[in-house]
Amino acid sequence: MDVIALVGPSGTGKSHRALQVAQEHKADAIIDDGILIKDGHIVAGESAKTEKSKIMAVRRAIFVLPGHAEAVREAIKKIQPHRILVIGTSENMVHKIAKTLKLPSIQLIIRIEDIASRAEIDLAQFHRLKEGKHIIPVPTIELKPHFSGYLIDPLQSLFKRSRVRRRKLGEKSIVRPVFSYYGKLIIDDTVIQAIVERIVKAREFVKKVKKISVEHILKGDEDRGLQITCEVILSYGNHIPTLIQQTQANIREAVEFTTGMIVHAININVKALYVDSQLLR
């Protein structure tokens, strides 16, 4: 197992660039801010952002709180990463993390100044200091179970002929990174409708899908997620409430996993029942 590191002062955009650095250097695991991440999932640890004081946050980030290092060490043994990227504010910090977690010596240290321009670093510091935004390199749906009560910005859906402005968040806000290295990621409502249609039509008791609509839940200019409505015709002879609940769960899982957007509600309206003529004989 190899270990590399990315270092730079707090708020300079290290976490934002973590995925890109990991990809370029073929690191399949990331240690950032007290958590172990692999394949877009939080595998072990607790984020320093959950701590109420700066002192406790620092102790959490360097894995000195009771039981923290042990849990992450066990997870590393289990997942057996090929290369780990350790993120920290200084060389001393990343070496201390590697030693505490009993990792091999760090082979390569990358500095944020080597991969980001002065303008990009200044912009990252602006978002941290002025807007309180902090990035964790995992999808929003992965953050939800770990940061209950925190404000998490979902992936914005950009509408045609409209502009969605980002709102200012509080100090303890957590935002997801931009996962495209080449430009904006735009997800049209028709994509969400296609996902829903595929899931619903796959259910054998659904005779026909009549209408699918996607509503965005907005607060000011902020897109807080989706409400999906679907009209269907079902085959007679099944317990409708059970089947509808299963379908709602399948839709939510598929849409959130595929798009990274948050689904708040799924309404399925049963417009009619199809009765096979053979059942009437």
Image (cartoon, grey):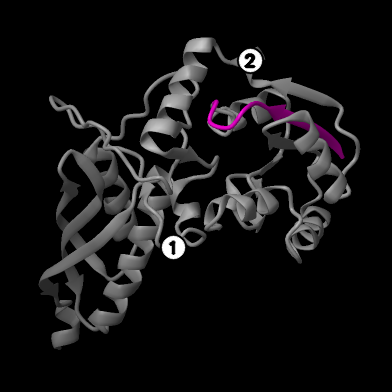
Residue 191 rendering spot, x and y as whole percentages: 28, 39
Q: CA distance from mark 2 to mark 1?
A: 34 Å
Determine which residue is flagged by label 1: 148
Q: Secondary structure at mark 1?
A: loop
Q: Is residue 239 above or below residue 162?
A: below
Q: Say which residue appears at 23% left-offset and 80% top-offset.
A: 240
Assess whether residue 11 is covered by the magenta stretch.
yes
Looking at the image, residue 241 sits to the left or right of residue 123; the answer is: left
Q: Secondary structure at mark 2?
A: helix
Which callout, 2 or 1, points at the residue further toward the start of the chain? Answer: 2
Location of residue 232 (image quadrant): bottom left
Residue 218 rendering spot, x and y as whole percentages: 17, 47
Q: Say which residue appears at 19% left-offset and 65% top-offset.
A: 267
Query: Looking at the image, which is closer to me, 201 or 279?
Result: 201
Q: In which quadrant of the rendered image does the C terminus lie? A: bottom left
Looking at the image, residue 274 sits to the left or right of residue 8; the answer is: left
Q: Which mark is residue 110?
A: none
Tell me if I can see residue 42 in this picture. Answer: no
Which amino acid type corresponds to the residue marked 1 in the rendered image? Ser
Query: Looking at the image, which is closer to me, 34 or 181?
Result: 34
Q: In which quadrant of the rendered image does the N terminus lie? A: top right
Assess disc 2: are there few (<14), some (14-19) or many (≥20) residues with their C-alpha within 10 Å of its C-alpha. some
Which amino acid type corresponds to the residue marked 2 in the rendered image? Glu
Q: Say which residue appears at 73% left-offset and 60% top-offset.
A: 65
Q: Which mark is residue 113?
A: 2
Query: Looking at the image, which is closer to me, 221 or 20?
Result: 221
Give the residues drawn in magenta, as a range: 1-12
Residue 126 rendering spot, x and y as whole percentages: 42, 25
Looking at the image, residue 168 sits to the left or right of residue 3; the answer is: left
Location of residue 96 (image quadrant): top right
Instruction: Kindly report which numbered mark, 2 or 1, lies closer to the viewer in this rendering.
Output: 2
